[in-house]
């Protein structure tokens, strides 16, 4: 992150650019490039599954994406499997951290719709994830992380221009987003606001 006084780089990438400390042509004796398992911290299941593949001689079966991340963990978005997807679809925001209802994207800067990871498919400790616990995804598995200055008040706030988030989910343009928002808010059913976890 800027100003990067230590001039730190990844092993084979600097952000999305090939190269890094070992250079883009580096290959292990096995012929494989560096296998990147990003995260802050990296999910323990991702690490152990790769170590098991190495130990059992099946590492060659692991498909890597363009950033050398295992596709099985990084070919979908964090939002996949998020229990708040219905709130996302209806543009229903949450009232704050730790709440069980409402989407964390609209006000709290959740990066789940733009971040590649399986955090909501492979749950932490087989129990939960950040978004399930009411904490926005901060996009820690993407090479551009951190996306904003980490000062209080800038990380967990959706940056907007005329009410439209500056950063939209992959594949969504600003005009379509604005039209969809009007339609979604006009058709929101009452049950979207209900807390389904209440006992």
Image (cartoon, rainbow, N blue to C red):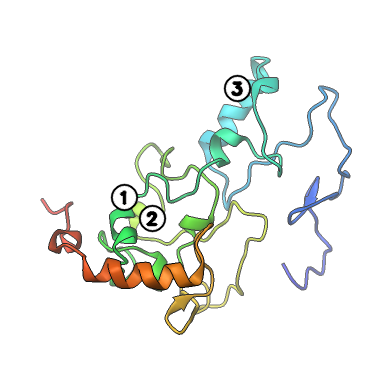
The residue sitting at the bottom extreme is: 162
Circle 2 residue: 131
Q: Point out residue 187 in the picture as x, y percentages from the top left corner.
A: 21, 66
The residue located at (74%, 54%) in the rendering is 16
- Quick one: label 2, few (<14), some, or many (20+) residues within 10 Å? many
Image-quadrant location for residue 105? bottom left
Image-quadrant location for residue 198? bottom left
- Quick one: label 1, few (<14), some, or many (20+) residues within 10 Å? some
**Residue in front for this viewpoint, 158 or 43:** 158
Q: Is mark 1 on a helix, strand or loop?
A: loop
Q: Point out residue 159 in the picture as x, y percentages from the top left corner.
A: 50, 77
Give the Cα distance between marks 1 and 2: 8 Å
**Residue in front for this viewpoint, 55 or 155:** 155
Q: What element carries label 3?
A: helix
Given contact means CB atoms under 8 Å apart, are the residues at marks 1 and 2 in contact? yes
Circle 3 residue: 52
Name above or below for residue 188 compared with residue 154: above
Given contact means CB atoms under 8 Å apart, are the residues at marks 3 and 2 in contact? no
Tell me the quarter of the image containing the N terminus.
bottom right
The residue located at (40%, 48%) in the rendering is 129
Name above or below for residue 154 compared with residue 183: below
């Amino acid at each position: 992150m800027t100003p990067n006084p230590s001039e730190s780089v990844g092993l084979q990438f600097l952000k999305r650019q090939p190269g890094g400390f070992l250079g883009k042509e580096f290959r292990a004796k096995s012929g494989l490039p560096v296998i990147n398992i990003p995260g802050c911290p990296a999910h323990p299941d991702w690490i152990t599954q790769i170590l098991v593949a190495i130990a059992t001689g099946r590492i060659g079966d692991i498909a890597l994406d363009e950033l050398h991340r295992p596709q099985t963990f990084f070919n979908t978005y964090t939002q996949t499997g998020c229990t708040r997807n219905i709130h996302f679809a209806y543009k229903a925001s949450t009232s704050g951290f730790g709440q069980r209802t409402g989407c964390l994207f609209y006000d709290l800067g959740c990066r789940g719709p733009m971040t590649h990871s399986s955090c909501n498919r492979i749950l932490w400790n087989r129990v939960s994830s950040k978004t399930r616990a009411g904490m926005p995804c901060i996009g820690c598995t993407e090479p551009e992380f951190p996306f904003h200055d980490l000062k209080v008040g800038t990380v967990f706030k959706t940056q907007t221009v005329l009410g439209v988030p500056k950063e939209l989910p992959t594949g969504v343009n600003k005009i379509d987003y604005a039209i969809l928002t009007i339609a979604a808010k006009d058709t929101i059913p009452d049950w979207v606001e209900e807390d389904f976890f209440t006992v």
